[in-house]
Amino acid sequence: MTSPPLQMDDAVYERLSRLCEAGNALVAEKRFDAAVTRFNDAWEWVPEPKKDWEASTWILTAIGDCYFRLRDLKSARPVLEYALRCPGGPGNAFIHLRLGQVLLEAGEHDAAADELMRAYKGGGADLFAEDDPKYLAFLATRAQL
C-alpha cells in the first residue's frame, strides 16, 4: 500500500512555485546558469526529507535539464539520478531522456541505451524531437524502434 502524497505548507509551496516560475522564465531566455540559481533557491525551501516531495522531482529535473544544456554533465548526472528516486521520478520519460543523454555523452553506452529506451517507451520519438538526432539514432542501433 502506498502512502498518500505529503501536503506541503501553502506558504512554502507558493515560495517554491514563484522561484520555479522565475527559473522557467530564465530557461526561456536561455539563461541556464541563472535558472540553476533560481531552481537551487527553490530546492532549499523543500522540507526534509527532500526525496519524499513531488516538488523535488520537478525542481531536480529542471536543475538537471539546465546542467545538461550547459554541458555540465558531471553536475547533471547526480541530480537526475536523485530525481528518479523522488515521487513520480521512476518512469518519468523526460528524466530518463536527460539521464540517457548524459550517460551517452559520458561513453556509458549500455546504461545510456537502457535510459533512452525507458524514455522512448514513455514518450515515443516525439520526446526526442527537440534534441540532437544522434540520441535517437544511437537508440536505433540498440533496439528496433
Image (cartoon, rainbow, N blue to C red):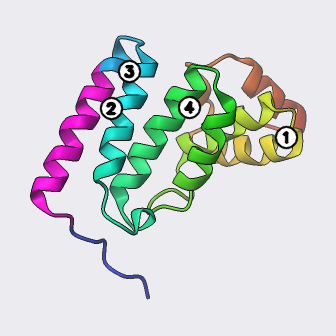
Question: Of marks 3 and 4, which one's residue comes earlier in the chain?
Answer: 3
Distance from Cα at disc 3 to Cα at disc 4: 25 Å
Residue 124 shown left or right of residue 62 in the figure: right
Q: Residue furthest left?
A: 11
Residue 74's disc is: none
Q: Residue at x 40, y 46 (%)?
A: 58
SS type, badge 4: helix
| Residues at marks 1 and 3 touching, judged by CB atoms closer than 8 Å | no
- The residue drawn where x is 64% and y is 21% is 71
> What residue is shown with label 3?
34
Q: Which residues are magenta?
A: 8-25
Percent coordinates x, y for residue 50 in the rendering: 40, 62
Q: Is residue 125 magenta?
A: no
Q: Depth check: 33 or 68 in front?
A: 33
Image position, residue 52 (x, y; %): 40, 68
Q: Secondary structure at mark 1?
A: loop
Residue denoted by label 2? 38
- Tell me the crowding category of disc 4: few under 14, some 14 to 19, or many 20 or more residues within 10 angstroms, Cα based: some
Q: Which residue: 82% across, 47% down?
A: 111
Q: Nearer the viewer, mark 2 or mark 4?
A: 2
Give 43 or 20, whichever is nearer the viewer. Answer: 43
